Amino acid sequence: MPRLFTGIEIPAEISLALSGFRGGLPGARWMDPENYHLTLRFIGDIDARMADDVCSVLGERRQRAPLQITIDGLDSFGGGKPRAVFARTSGNGGLSELQAEQERLLRQVGLVPETRKFTPHVTLARLKNVSPIDVADYIATRGHFPKLTFTADRFVLYSSRASVGGGPYVIEAAYPLS
């Protein structure tokens, strides 16, 4: 079975704007813009029966209004050993509530709890053996980041195949937010 995760799709015009930040960081493996997404909950490699349970339980979530999402800057994960550059989001109350609800639902079908703190973001590049100084310089020289806002009217269940740099991602199911 493929690796599964839930996420928010990034509209084409936002992906195009984010793709303008590709390049300028030696050693970075840049994500293809068509694979940009905002991960809500990583599920992992599961068998077909569990995948059916996941699809079903995600359909049981409470109805909620579409979400306004604002992407407002660049950041990195990993501190002294940077592993990713990402576009960060702000004003994430509704997004955090949606993620917490998914966490509860997925635990009901037997998935282990996510141990990492939820940090909504769009990964732009994966890093390996990249200097933290180079990452800091990259982010500092792109300090005039334009706010990018969009409305998410659904979340999706993605699958991915093992590959270098992530993707391609396939939408397995979609769940409207309205």
Image (cartoon, helix red, strand yellow):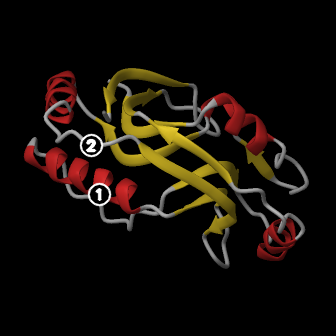
Residue in the image at 31% along x and 53% along y: 99
Residue in the image at 37% along x and 46% along y: 42
Task: Quadrant for residue 157, please give it.
Answer: top left
Callout 2–callout 1 Cβ contact below 8 Å: yes
Say which label, 2 or 1, has the lower sequence index.
2
Task: Quadrant for residue 77, please give it.
Answer: bottom right
Q: Position of residue 49 (x, y in %)?
A: 14, 24
Quadrant (top left, top right, bottom left, bottom right) of the C terminus: top left
Q: Secondary structure at mark 2?
A: loop
Quadrant (top left, top right, bottom left, bottom right) of the N terminus: top left
Tag of residue 97: 1
Tag of residue 134: none
Task: Quadrant for residue 34, please give it.
Answer: top right
Q: Secondary structure at mark 1?
A: helix
Q: At label 1, which amino acid type do we have?
A: Glu
Tag of residue 64: 2
Decide if residue 164 is in sight here: yes
Residue in the image at 67% along x and 79% along y: 80
Decide if residue 32 is in sight here: no
Q: Nearer the viewer, mark 2 or mark 1?
A: 2
Residue in the image at 11% along x and 45% along y: 110
Q: Position of residue 152 (x, y in %)?
A: 46, 38
In the rendered view, does 9 fall on the left or right side of 42?
right
* Placement of 59 over or under 65, stated as above or below: above
Q: At label 2, which amino acid type do we have?
A: Arg
Q: Position of residue 9 (x, y in %)?
A: 51, 34
Q: Position of residue 136 (x, y in %)?
A: 80, 74
Crowd class of label 2 (few under 14; some 14 to 19; many from 20; radius 10 Å): some
Q: For this rendering, which residue is in front, 21 or 27?
A: 21
In the rendered view, does 46 fall on the left or right side of 27?
left
Q: For this rendering, which residue is in front, 70 or 160?
A: 70
